[in-house]
Image (spheres, rainbow, N blue to C red):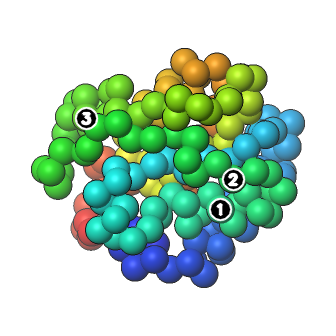
Amino acid sequence: MLLKFEQMEPLGAWFAERLAEVVNSEADRLAADVVVPVPLQRERERERGYNQAALLSKPLAKRLRLPHKAGLLVRTRPRPDKQVLSVEERWESVRGAFATRPDSRVDNLRVLLVDDVLTTGATLDACARALREAGTKSVIGLTVARALRNPLPGAREW
């Protein structure tokens, strides 16, 4: 939550270091040409002042010595205002909600797509589809956390 709502850049750098360790330990399977954060809608990024996925992707790209392309992917449709979405609503809300910029050159690129939390996989799937449709060779999704759909009894939900 600190990364998502408090712009904790040192925390982003720490997580990026862990992600770099994973990527380097699986270099054959996770080879990439570029690092791309999952984009926020403009209003949300303006309101928050930053994109939490970019707090991870930028230091990750630096550690991996890869280009960081924050503007490669854009969100074309805002997320619904509803705070809690069902699995079906999540998938529907992001279907077709991302695209590459018209002037982007992505042919045959291997993309590391970075987000903070994986909940259902819908966002990463929608972003990967947009990148693949634009001509990327491959897309590998990386996150630092996974949300549990059915928390353990007694676990606190944030």
| Residue 39 makes an appearance in the image | yes
Query: Which residue position is annotated with label 3?
Result: 93
User: What kind of residue is marked 1?
Assistant: Lys
Q: Are marks 1 and 2 in contact (CB under 8 Å)?
A: yes
Instruction: Residue 113: give its label.
Output: none
**Residue 87 visible at all:** no
Disc 1 to disc 2, C-alpha distance: 6 Å
Q: Is residue 95 left or right of residue 146?
A: left
Mark 3 vs 1, N-terminal side: 1
Is 80 displayed left or right of 75 in the figure? Answer: left
Residue that numbered label 2 is attached to: 68
Quadrant location of residue 98?
Answer: top left
Amino acid type shown at disc 2: His
Amino acid residing under circle 3: Ser
Tell me where residue 64 appears, x and y as whole percent.
81, 56
Looking at this view, name the residue that lies furthest to the left: 82
- Disc 3/disc 1 C-alpha distance (Å): 26 Å
* Numbered disc in front, either 2 or 3: 2
- Mark 2, Cα crowd under 10 Å, few <14 / some 14-19 / many 20+, is many
Q: Residues within 10 Å of mark 1 (few under 14, many from 20)?
A: many
User: Could you tell whether 26 is left or right of 114 in the image?
Assistant: right
Q: Nearer the viewer, mark 3 or mark 1?
A: 1
Q: Residue at x 45, y 62 (%)?
A: 51
Residue beneath the point at 26% across and 61% down: 153
Q: Secondary structure at mark 2?
A: loop
Rendered position, 115 above or below 139 = below
